[in-house]
């Protein structure tokens, strides 16, 4: 769920490469630019030039009854774009970029194990990381900004986080929220590092913190209603994760970390499905 801007130096290289490459694909429009020294360089007008791709998160659901995963590549009503079986009834579904490829893939938390897969296809896990324990609620995020989402758990108002899949004790502990809160993880300020938050079901309040240290909320807002299942994601590709809720088969998504109505809402999945969020079809 982390958007990483292309470094300026790399961006300059990409732009210059696009100026000197001649589009060969049939049917692509092309043009040339005459420079002050009289030379000409072709440029592509087809939109095929390399550019920094923004990550946009979309929704999916995990269906406990059949351990089915139903991913959609747009935040709109419609059939699933990707369907496969993963995990088992009783697992907590997860999604993240476990291998720093840019795309988010499935995982589950099961009794102190993070069982993570590198592809959104049926198959066994690629990573089995022991972290946390039964009764914990799992969260995943890029806690150190290296592009890899790694495990965390929430237990009685404390987040325990690790920056790798090696097992072992928590590397970071953050007291935030209360027992009974639903933990959240995302990049609330667009700096490339995921931090923690909580959703408080009793009051529909969301509390977000921008650093991985114990302390009061940097951002608080009210969103959703009793019984909603919260989600967070970057719905508009601006690098900032913002809230949403799933309510009886309808997703309500908001594009800012402020109180207010949904910016987007649509029917998806069935009552009883658990929501998941990621960029399933990211292409670098
Ligand atoms: Ca990935
Ligand atoms: Ca990381
Ligand atoms: Ca951040
Ligand atoms: Ca956003």
Image (cartoon, rainbow, N blue to C red):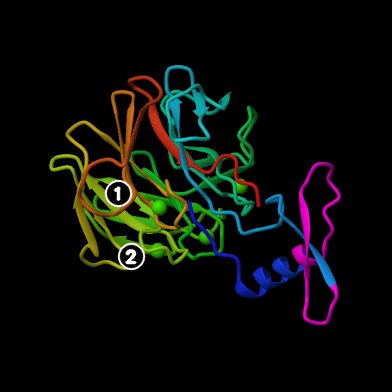
> For residue 203: magenta?
no
60 lies left or right of 122 = left
Pointer 2: residues within 10 angstroms few (<14), some, or many (20+)? some
211 lies left or right of 23 = left
Please give the label number shown on residue 210: 2
State whether label 1 is within 8 Å of ligand 2: no
Which numbered disc, 2 or 1, marks the residue closer to the eye?
2
> For residue 32: magenta?
yes
245 versus 239 height, above or below: above
Question: Magenta span: helix, strand or loop, mainly?
Answer: loop
Disc 2 element: loop
Q: Earlier in the sequence, mark 2 or mark 1?
A: 1
**Residue 132 visible in image:** no
Q: Position of residue 57 (x, y in %)?
A: 47, 44
Please give the label number shown on residue 3: none
State whether label 2 is within 8 Å of ligand 3: yes
Disc 1 element: strand
**Residue where numbered disc 1 is placed:** 155
The range drawn in magenta is: 18-39
């Amino acid at each position: 769920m982390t958007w990483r801007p292309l470094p300026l130096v790399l961006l300059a290289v990409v732009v210059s490469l696009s100026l000197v490459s001649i589009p060969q694909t049939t049917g692509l429009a092309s043009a040339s630019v005459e420079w002050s020294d009289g030379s000409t360089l072709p440029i592509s007008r087809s939109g095929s030039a390399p550019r920094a791709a923004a990550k946009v998160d979309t929704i999916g659901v995990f269906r406990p009854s059949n351990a089915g995963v139903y991913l959609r590549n747009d935040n709109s009503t419609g059939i699933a774009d990707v369907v496969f079986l993963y995990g088992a009834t009783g697992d907590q579904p997860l999604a993240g970029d476990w291998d720093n490829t840019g795309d988010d893939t499935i995982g589950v938390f099961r009794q102190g194990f993070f069982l993570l897969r590198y592809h959104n296809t049926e198959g066994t896990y690629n990573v089995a990381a022991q972290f946390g324990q039964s009764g914990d609620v799992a969260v995943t995020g890029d806690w150190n900004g290296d592009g890899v989402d790694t495990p965390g758990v929430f237990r009685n108002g404390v987040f325990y986080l690790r920056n790798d899949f090696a097992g072992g004790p928590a590397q970071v502990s953050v007291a935030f929220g209360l027992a009974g809160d639903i933990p959240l993880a995302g990049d609330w300020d667009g700096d490339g590092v995921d931090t923690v938050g909580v959703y408080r079901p009793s009051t529909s309040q969301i509390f977000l913190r921008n650093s991985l240290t114990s302390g009061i909320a940097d951002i608080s807002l009210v969103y959703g209603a009793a019984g909603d299942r919260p989600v967070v994601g970057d719905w508009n590709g601006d690098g900032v994760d913002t809230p949403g809720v799933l309510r009886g088969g309808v997703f309500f998504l908001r594009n800012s970390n402020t109180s207010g109505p949904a910016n987007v809402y649509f029917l998806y999945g069935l009552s009883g499905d658990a929501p998941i969020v990621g960029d399933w079809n990211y292409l670098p």
